[in-house]
């Protein structure tokens, strides 16, 4: 298994910002599974969490309030998952004071000077780089892990994707909203625009002037940036009442004709991709660090590939990708 080789003590000073959240806690879990020990580990969250303790490798760590002063201290690496506005302010301060930041928010993803990294695809952009590194959007990461080998072998003209995204993608409050609505039919939605329990909402992020949602445009722009591909991408993103695991129905028009056997062969060799004989489901992939693919089909003329893709959004879509970036940097 990936990571078992890392039993390392790193003379690195590491900070996790947003340590009490869905992604922050999972970052700690993934690091712990890979048995990392660091010279110094610091955990940050909002004022309300200051003084709480979180465990890492059997030891209690006290959560600190995130402050400008703490970000000026200088860290070897800071992993941020506390939302866009927190990153905009504090990651910028940290980077200015010499820290390398791996940021899970959307704050810097489309900044031309900031690398947007899925290590299996473009870790080369990290060579010699210091500063802010952006982790892509969760629904994009799981899809590009499958699309990139298709692009490299068959070329891609156009991608049409519909997502079915879990409530944990909205952070812990998304899980609470679904659970409360399931218990109480009169519970008023607080974070979603309509009830999510026993429902589907084709509305993730604000709807923009062009009619697409913010989440849909993230999938379009980030896919093209990560794969350095000018293919067309069209997305419809849907929130569904699932706690963990995003599913995606993907249609890909290819440049070079492909048979089902050829595609299965290419995907079965792809890094951190698992091909299923039938199909993966969110419940089955919870806790996995791979992007799972099933129901692969080829159109009658061999020019389009259709597949079903599922991954643990908090791990593959955020925490594990961030830790994989950190591993690349630690081992550089
Ligand atoms: N969940 C996913 O699947 C996913 C995937 C990809 C990217 N992301 C991104 O990752 C980030 C975090 O998501 P999440 O799901 O972990 O959210 P979450 O469960 O709501 O956790 C948010 C974290 O941010 C902290 N925080 C909030 N305001 C803060 C402030 N002013 N100063 C310091 N810390 C603050 C919270 O601390 P308190 O506990 O003290 O409030 C908590 O630790 C977001 O940018 C999100 O878009 C999430």
Image (spheres, helix red, strand yellow):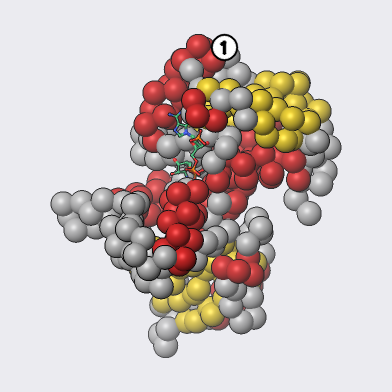
Query: Residue visible at 66% across and 59% down?
Result: 288
Q: Residue at x 56, y 25 (%)?
A: 50
Is 213 left, or right, of 185 in this rendering?
Answer: left
| Whether residue 243 is situated above or below residue 284 in the rendered picture | above
In the rendered image, residue 115, in percent from the top left (x then y), is placed at 47, 35
Q: Which residue is mark 1?
A: 73
- Tell me where residue 4 appears, x and y as whole percent: 81, 46
- The quadrant of the rendering that contains the C terminus is top right
Q: Position of residue 167 (x, y in %)?
A: 46, 58
Determine the image quadrant of residue 322: top right
Give the quadrant of the N terminus: bottom right
Q: Residue at x 54, y 41 (%)?
A: 21
> Would residue 77 be found to the left or right of residue 159 on screen?
right
Badge 1 crowding class, 10 Å Cα cut-off, few under 14, some 14 to 19, many 20 or more, is: few
Is residue 2 visible to us here? Answer: yes
- Report x, y in % for residue 211: 19, 58
Tell me the SS state at disc 1.
loop
Pick whichever, 194 or 24, lies toward us: 194
Camera sees residue 230: no
Taking the view exactly as shown, the residue that stands out farthest to the bottom is 300
Q: Nearer the viewer, residue 299 or 38?
A: 38
């Amino acid at each position: 298994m990936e990571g078992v080789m890392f039993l390392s003590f790193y003379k690195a000073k590491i900070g996790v910002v947003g340590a009490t959240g869905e992604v922050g806690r999972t970052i700690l879990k993934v690091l712990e599974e890979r048995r990392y020990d660091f010279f110094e580990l610091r955990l940050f969250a909002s004022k309300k969490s200051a003084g709480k303790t979180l465990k890492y490798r059997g030891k209690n760590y006290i959560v600190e309030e995130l402050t400008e002063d703490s970000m000026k201290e200088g860290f070897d690496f800071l992993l941020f998952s506390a939302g866009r506005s927190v990153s905009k302010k504090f990651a910028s301060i940290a980077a200015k004071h010499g820290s390398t930041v791996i940021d899970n928010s959307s704050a810097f993803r489309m900044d031309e000077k900031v690398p947007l990294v899925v290590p299996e695809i473009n870790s080369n952009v990290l060579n010699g780089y210091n500063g802010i590194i952006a982790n892509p959007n969760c629904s994009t990461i799981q899809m590009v892990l499958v699309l990139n080998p298709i692009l490299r072998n068959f070329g891609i003209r156009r991608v049409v994707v519909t997502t079915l995204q879990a409530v944990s993608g909205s952070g812990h409050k998304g899980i609470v909203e679904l659970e409360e609505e399931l218990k109480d039919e009169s519970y008023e939605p607080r974070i979603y625009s309509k009830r999510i329990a026993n429902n589907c909402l084709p509305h993730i992020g604000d709807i923009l002037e062009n009619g697409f949602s913010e989440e849909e445009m993230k999938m379009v722009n980030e896919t093209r940036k990560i794969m350095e591909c000018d293919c067309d991408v069209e997305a419809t993103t849907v929130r569904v009442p699932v706690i963990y695991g995003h599913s995606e129905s993907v249609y890909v028009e290819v440049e070079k004709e492909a048979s089902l056997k050829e595609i299965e062969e290419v995907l079965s060799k792809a890094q951190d991709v698992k091909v299923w004989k039938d199909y993966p489901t969110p419940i089955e992939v919870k806790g996995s660090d791979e992007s799972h693919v099933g129901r692969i089909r080829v159109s009658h003329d061999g020019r389009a590939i259709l597949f079903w893709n599922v991954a643990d959004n908090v791990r593959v879509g955020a925490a594990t990708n961030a830790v994989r970036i950190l591993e690349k940097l630690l081992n550089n």
